[in-house]
Structure formats: C-alpha cells, structure tokens
Amino acid sequence: MPEGHTLHRLAREHTRLLGGRPVAAASPQGRFAAGAARIDGRVVEAVQARGKHLFYEFDGLAERLHVHLGLYGVFSGGPLPAPDPRGALRLRLTTDGTWVDLRGPTACELLSPADVDRIAARLGPDPLREDARPALAYRRIRRSRAPLAGLLLDQSVIAGVGNVYRAEILFRHGIAPTRPGAALDAAEWEAVWRDLVRLMRAGVRAGRIVTTRPGHRTRRRGAPTRADSFYVYGRAGLPCRVCGTPVMSDTLAARRVYWCPRCQPV
DNA sequence: GCTAAATGTTGAT
DNA sequence: TCAACCTTTAGCT
C-alpha cells in the first residue's frame, strides 16, 4: 500500500521495464478501455513520480497517463507469459518481455499537459525529488495554527507523506501530533525534513517503510521484521519501544494517529 | 460466505 | 466532518 516511496519505486521499475519499448495496452475490466486503446502500441518515453502520483509519457501522444493508487490500488507484474486476467483488472501493459497489471486505482486516466501541470502545481515539495524546495513547506507550516499531524498529511504542504510516515516522523522528533504548525521552529523543521528524505529514500530502496533504529527493535540483529518496523504506527496499546508507556491512538480528521504521550509531550 | 479494515482523495454538508 | 469510491485480504462465521 502506497506512500510516496512506493510510487517512486514504481516509477523506477516501470522506467526500467517499459521505457523505450512499445507496449500493448488493454483494460480487461473495461473502465479504461478508451484510454488503453490510445496508448496501445506506443513507446513509453518516461515514467515519473510526484508525491503519490505517477505520470507516463508516450511517443507521439501529448496526453499523459496519470495513475493514483489511492488506498487500495496495486501494481503487479513479471516476465511473460502473463497470467490470464482475473478479477477487476483496470490496465495491463505488455512489452515483448514483461507484463504490468494495475488494479483498484483511484485514478487511471489520460490527461492533457495542462491538467498534469495543474496537479503538479497543487503539490508541496516531495522529499524524494531532487528539485524539492522544503522552504515552501515550512512557510505553510509556520503560518498555520493547525496541528502538525494534519499539515504533514496535506499533499499541498508536503507531497508523498502518508499515515505511516507522519506518525513515525513525529515520534522520531518527539513532537506531539496536536502541536500547531506555528510552534515548529526552524531547526526542528530542518531536522524533520532531512529525516523524511532519509527515511523515504530508504523506503524506496527496501520497498517498505522502516523507521526504527536497530537498538529499538525486538530483534536487534538481522533484517527488521514487519512487527519491528515502526515505533508507533498501528501499535495502539502496546508499550513504546523507547519508554514503555502504552502507545495512544485517536482519530483525527477521519484518519488514525498514533503517538507516545511520554516521548511526544504536548 | 460475510464483514471490516487498509500506507488515500474528493466533493458534499 | 462525513460519506463515497476503487479492490483485496484477514479474520471471522
């Protein structure tokens, strides 16, 4: 399931698998049949991620394919032969060597360059992009009295952070989810941004989110297990890995937030 | 076989 | 603030 690291990993993978090659496109489910027909047979020129959005460029086609996985969307793929399409398969792309399947996305559509620009324009800096300008995010945060837990999930403030990274970054910096943006000083912001870049890059490499330091895991040697990967996300009621206080959780703006009341005092 | 939950966003109220 | 939407899977029965 997708936070920004998943999309950047997919952009790289799809560039490697599909880039420079003609693809056959089909929408067995039918909901993207017209779009698939326009892509079918074209060469993939580039695949890019911006925050949680993916954009595909095709030779000779001004429009771009825009994919947003939403909460449930998922890609799968492998070497040919492709398995028979099963279930709700929105899009299948096939080259002479590989197949890529897309299921359950919130968005799978062809967009004009202007529409793509519009989406890009409403996204904040993406920690996984070299061209990110973190000062733009801090300007928004510093001016806001809204809780940081909300600001971190706001894609127009920072693009690519999701519910796991937000909970974990706040823990790692000892910041309560309810702390107003305006109360985050410049040095704290600097540290938070640098940490996001580091954690999300590691997420792209590993293909999953790991935020715990080795000394804070139950198993201190070897690769972290799934249960060892987070400090607070999904751990309501379990003892904090650092101080043992039970981890708290609450619903904020329809999303669940997790924090340690002792390590992250208000 | 059914239900709820899931790392998300949008649009209505 | 809430419901709707897209789909799969885990955990029940």
Image: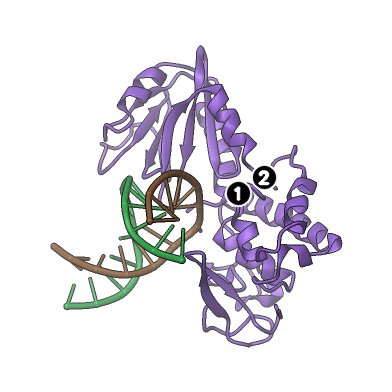
Chain colours: A purple, B brown, C green
Q: Quadrant of the C terminus of chain A?
A: bottom right
Please rate how many residues cluster around mark 2, counting C-alpha atoms within 10 Å: few if below 14, some from 14 to 19, many from 20: many
Q: Nearer the viewer, residue A51 or A28?
A: A51
* Discs 2, 1: same chain: yes
Q: Secondary structure at mark 1?
A: loop
Write down the chain letter for disc 1: A
Q: Secondary structure at mark 2?
A: loop
Q: Where residue A122 sits in the image (x, y, percent)?
A: 62, 40
Q: Nearer the viewer, residue A148 or A244?
A: A148
Position of residue A264 in the picture relative to residue A256 (left or right): right
Task: Kindly tell me whether residue A223 is visible in this rendering.
Answer: no
Q: Which residue is mark 1?
A: A155
Task: Kindly tell me whether residue A166 is visible in this rendering.
Answer: yes
Quadrant of res A165: bottom right
Please rate how many residues cluster around mark 1, counting C-alpha atoms within 10 Å: few if below 14, some from 14 to 19, many from 20: some
Of mark 2 and mark 1, the one earlier in the sequence is 2
Cβ–Cβ under 8 Å for marks 2 and 1 = yes
Which residue is located at x 66 percent, y 69 percent?
A: A212
Residue type (three-letter) at the residue carrying disc 2: Gly
Residue type (three-letter) at the residue carrying disc 1: Gln
Q: Which residue is mark 2?
A: A124
Which residue is located at x 55 percent, y 48 percent?
A: A6
Which residue is located at x 74 percent, y 41 percent?
A: A132
Q: Where residue A85 sits in the image (x, y, percent)?
A: 27, 37
Residue A133's mark?
Answer: none
Q: Marks 2 and 1, Cα distance to the nearest angstrom?
A: 6 Å
Q: Where residue A46 sits in the image (x, y, percent)?
A: 58, 25
